[in-house]
Amino acid sequence: MPLPDRERMKYPIAVTILLFSSTISLAQSQRIGNYQFSKSKSNHTARIVIRNETFDPSKHKIGYDERSGSLVDGRVAHGAESVPRTQIKSIEFYGDGRKIRVPSRLYADCYNPNLEHQYVNIRWSRDARSVLVTMLGADGAGAYYVVWILRKNGKHSRYFKDAF
């Protein structure tokens, strides 16, 4: 006996979700090192260097909050469903050759980052005063998008969005 149309549609949707989530799971970087990204627009150049490192839980206070999830040092641990494996060590921003400081508060709570080129994107703003850097971090249920707005005047900001 054939399945009703509504039941038949559940199977392709379930398979699509399963394949998509497994792709993100396989995407997470385990490599430790320096990752460089650059973008040019007219006579402007931007270079971003992101360094990651292995997370050492002995140097941090690990916790859990029912509303926010995993915590590291009292802050929400973006991308960590439990103890993180990796963390961003530093972000360097070079706008038109000048190094512009990026404070650690903008990345210190970003765990298990995906730093391969297909997961990080750089784009200049229309007025070339800032660079938008997007990254897909972590995998599975902990996956997140972060957008850093890095400005030549040093007044940077960021935004988070859960990937699911």
Image (cartoon, rainbow, N blue to C red):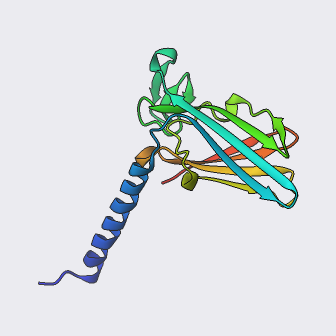
Q: Is residue 102 above or below residue 28?
A: above
Q: Residue at x 35, y 69 (%)?
A: 13
Q: Residue at x 77, y 44 (%)?
A: 150
98 with respect to 82 (left or right):
right
Q: How many numbered circles does the render carry?
A: 0
For the N terminus, the quadrant is: bottom left
Residue 52 on image: x %, y %: 56, 33
Query: Residue 134 at what x, y percent from top left?
Result: 64, 51
Q: At x 46% / y 15%, what residue is drawn?
A: 58
In the shown orientation, is residue 135 left or right of residue 62?
Answer: right
**Image point 68% across, 35% down: which residue?**
91
The quarter of the displayed image where residue 156 is located:
top right
**Residue reaching furthest to the top:** 58
Horizontal relation, residue 120 to residue 128: left or right: left
Give percent across and percent down for residue 50: 64, 38
Q: As rendered, which of 125 and 158 lies closer to the eye?
A: 125
Farthest residue in the left direction? Answer: 1
Expressed as whole percent of the image width and height from the top left, the position of residue 66 reads: 44, 33
Question: Is residue 27 depicted above or below 33 in this figure?
Answer: below
